[in-house]
Amino acid sequence: MRRVPASVPLPASGAHADARSGHADRSGKSGTSSFRPAVCQVVGYKNSGKTTLICELIPLLKAKGCSVAVIKHDVHGFETDRPGTDTWKQREAGAGAVAITGKDQSFIYESRSRELAELIQAFMHYDYVLVEGFKEEPYPKIVLLRNEADLELASRLHGVAASAIWGELPGSIAEDLPPGQRWFGINDTSAIAEYLWRERIFFQNFNI
């Protein structure tokens, strides 16, 4: 595998982890937590397999004892609440935000968009935050490449740490990646999860 490109900054000197467990040090000075989640964007063009890859990484990271949150960017609009439910009625009545919580789950709906940094801030207590989309944001990325035409993403986007390449012979496309950029086969999810685990401090460095 190839190394992370030199253009991607290294972790801050203050970032550290428990080498035995892979878990970051949650203790902080003066009773303030210094824990920051590892943030990784999974980006690519439509139908490149972003959701599938994230769904396969979640149980692999959880098997290592990590909690995982996911943030998805949907430019086409979406609907998460069903007509006729109490929260739907409350939103239809004009509430700008509605929250519902129960024994095992919570749901918050707001009639506004949010910046990615703000969304990440809401998940600071998770070990990993996997972000689907938001190509232009500066967090470290795994970019999904289906063919040679997609190679421009690996060069154009900021913070690309690695590429996941489709095809039986991904090495042929990898030859045209920017010098030093790490790459994986799209189906090598165990290796990608291990990379996220091993380089966790690097991914924590980009949090807010």
Image (cartoon, helix red, strand yellow):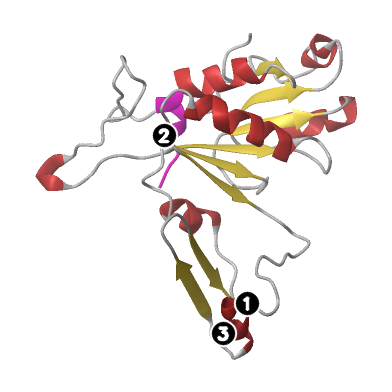
Residue identifier under label 2: 204
Locate the N terminus and report the quarter of the image it occupies.
top right
Amino acid at pointer 1: Thr
Amino acid at pointer 3: Gln
Q: Is residue 206 magenta?
A: yes
Image location (x, y in percent) of residue 178:
71, 20
Image location (x, y in percent) of residue 125:
36, 45
Mark 2 closeness class: few <14, some 14–19, many ≥20 residues within 10 Å: many
Residue identifier under label 1: 85
Q: Is residue 120 magenta?
A: no
Residue identifier under label 3: 90
Image location (x, y in percent) of residue 92:
64, 86
Mark 3 closeness class: few <14, some 14–19, many ≥20 residues within 10 Å: some
**Whole-number angstrom distance, CA of label 2 to CA of label 1:** 38 Å
Disc number lying in front (2 or 1) = 1
- Asked whether the residues under the numbered discs 2 and 1 touch, taking CB atoms below 8 Å apart as contact, a structural biologist would say no
Of the two numbered discs 2 and 1 on the same chain, state the one appearing first in sequence: 1
Tell me the SS state at disc 3.
helix
